């Protein structure tokens, strides 16, 4: 907030995100279509209650996200994965790194 500007992402990754965000805006015809949309929040207004648990609950949420993103007809599937979390330190504080069954890593 004060002092030197900090970057959340590494420079190469930040460049990649900015490049593809710019392409997205170009594809959508600028930022006006985004400004016209509502902010989706994790509330009952956008995500109705469900008694589902586990993977079925995740699928329920995934379907709602697809609907809210106007992607309900897109051929997407949610695949369950077993995840093992590892604690690791980063420049911005503590974070968690996860390993999937397939050996892929992502930051959390």
Image (cartoon, grey):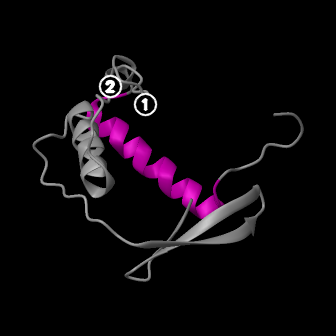
Marks 1 and 2: in contact by CB < 8 Å? yes
Residue at 63% x, 56% y: name it. 9
Quadrant the N terminus occupies: top right
Q: Nearer the viewer, residue 18 or 78?
A: 78
Q: Is residue 64 left or right of residue 43?
A: left
| Segment tinted magenta in the rendering | 9-30
The CA distance from mark 2 to mark 1 is 7 Å
Q: Is residue 42 above or below residue 12?
A: above
Residue 60: x and y in percent read 24, 43
Q: Residue furthest right?
A: 3
Are there few (<14), some (14-19), or many (20+) residues within 10 Å of tag 1? few
Dividing the picture into quadrants, the one containing residue 97 is: bottom right
Q: Is residue 86 above or below residue 33?
A: below
Q: Nearer the viewer, residue 3 or 51?
A: 51
Residue on which disc 1 sits:
42
Residue 77: x and y in percent read 19, 58
Q: Is residue 90 magenta?
A: no
Residue at 39% x, 19% y: name it. 35
Please give the label number shown on residue 83: none
Dividing the picture into quadrants, the one containing residue 3 is: top right
Q: Is residue 11 left or right of residue 80?
A: right
Q: Examine the residues drawn in magenta and state their main secondary structure.
A: helix
Residue on which disc 2 sits:
46
Helix, strand or loop at label 1? It is: loop
Q: Residue furthest top?
A: 36
């Amino acid at each position: 907030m004060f002092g030197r500007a900090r970057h959340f992402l590494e420079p190469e990754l930040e460049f990649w995100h900015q490049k593809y965000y710019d392409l997205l805006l170009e594809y959508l015809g600028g930022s006006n279509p985004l400004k016209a949309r509502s902010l989706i929040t994790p509330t009952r207004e956008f995500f109705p209650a469900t008694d589902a648990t586990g993977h079925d609950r995740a699928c329920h949420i995934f379907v709602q996200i697809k609907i809210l993103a106007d992607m309900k007809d897109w051929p997407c599937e949610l695949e369950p994965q077993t995840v093992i979390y590892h604690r690791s330190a980063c420049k911005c504080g503590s974070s968690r790194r996860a390993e999937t069954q397939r050996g892929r890593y992502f930051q959390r």
